[in-house]
Amino acid sequence: MSTASEADSPARPTLTSLPVVGGVVTAALVILGGYVGHDVAAYAVLAAGLALAWGWPLLLDLPRPTGSSVVLAAGAVGMAGVVLFAGSDDDGMQAISLVLAIALVLAFLHELIRTDGRGSLTVSLAGCAFGLVVLASGMFGAAAASYDTGDAALAVAVGTPALGLLADTLLPVAHEHEWSIPAGALLGVVLGLILGATSDGAWPELLITGLVAGLVGASIRRGLRQLESLDPAGRLGYGIAAVLACGVLAYGAQWFINR
């Protein structure tokens, strides 16, 4: 018999639901791109980022979703351009921060030209800023593929939350919430060890990357599931965001490996 808390909880994802499909496909494309080259990974993140730009404002129920989508899409294109032309140039990669800052200015300008009284101003700005940070994290992950062992670090960073999405559909309903975070962390550790075994002594960094990605991914999934978006684009954005949000961990991992 269902308890009250289970009845009030967000809908449980299934293997064929949009969040799971979106997250797994995003991770697969980014990982494949990472092993081919950082430019291919950047295009994969850009494609996922444009889908996220469409669905993110709907997922968060932002007051002017079209304008917020334009800001997010502009940020995704700008960050992808930096990754494509910077390669492994550290100075060039710092330009992602500049693009992020410009996109945040665009978010403020979007609010200034609103004609609806600027209701929910804080929610709109915070939601747009959060989406830009998720996009930036994904682009940093794509950039990691241009460094030694960066492809393996990227595979661990984005593969772990994708596995977490799959695991969430298989956990017992009665223990889903308490088991989600430890299950995600365990999957990340296992994936880090597997890829670390083929990465010339980089297994400690990849293990830690998997552990952190598992914890971060599970936390983000738990938070976003509370939004209960019924819009297909919003639900797709949920899965994509859960994966891209961990991309920056790959950049940090390759820095520790190659320092």
Image (tube, grey):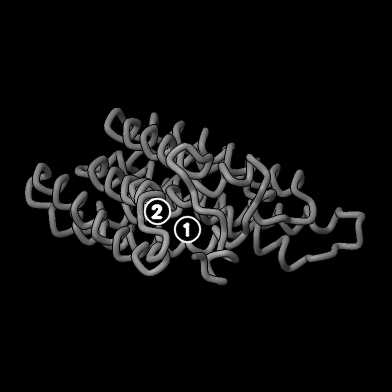
Q: Quadrant of the C terminus?
A: bottom left
- In this view, the residue in front, 207 or 183, is 183
Amino acid type assigned to the residue bearing label 1 in the image: Arg
Q: In the rendered view, does 169 fall on the left or right side of 186?
A: right
Could you tell whether 105 is left or right of 52 in the image?
A: right
Callout 1: helix, strand or loop?
A: helix
Foreground pick, 237 / 76: 237
Question: What residue is pinned by disc 2?
Answer: 168
Q: Position of residue 217 (x, y in %)?
A: 40, 58
**Pointers 2 and 1 in contact (CB under 8 A)?**
yes
Q: Which mark is residue 141?
A: none
Circle 1 is placed at which residue position? 221
Nearer the observer: mark 2 or 1; the answer is 2
Is residue 40 visible to us here? yes
Residue at image coords 20%, 54%: 206
Q: How crowded is mark 1: few (under 14 residues within 10 Å), some or many (20 or more)?
A: many
Q: Residues within 10 Å of mark 2 (few under 14, many from 20)?
A: many
- The location of residue 168, given as percent across then percent down, is 39, 53
Give me the residue at 66% from left, 56% from top: 60
* Residue 183 on image: x %, y %: 29, 60
Q: Please give the name of the residue rendered at 38% of the width and 36% of the height, measured from the top-left corner.
A: 30
Q: In which quarter of the image is residue 62?
A: bottom right
Helix, strand or loop at label 2? It is helix
* Distance from Cα at disc 2 to Cα at disc 1: 9 Å
Judging depth in this view, the residue of 184 and 195 nearest the camera is 184
Tell me: 212 left or right of 201: right
Residue at image location 78% in from the left, 53% down from the top: 110
Q: Is 93 placed left or right of 75 in the picture? A: left
Q: Which kind of residue does numbered mark 2 sit on?
A: Asp
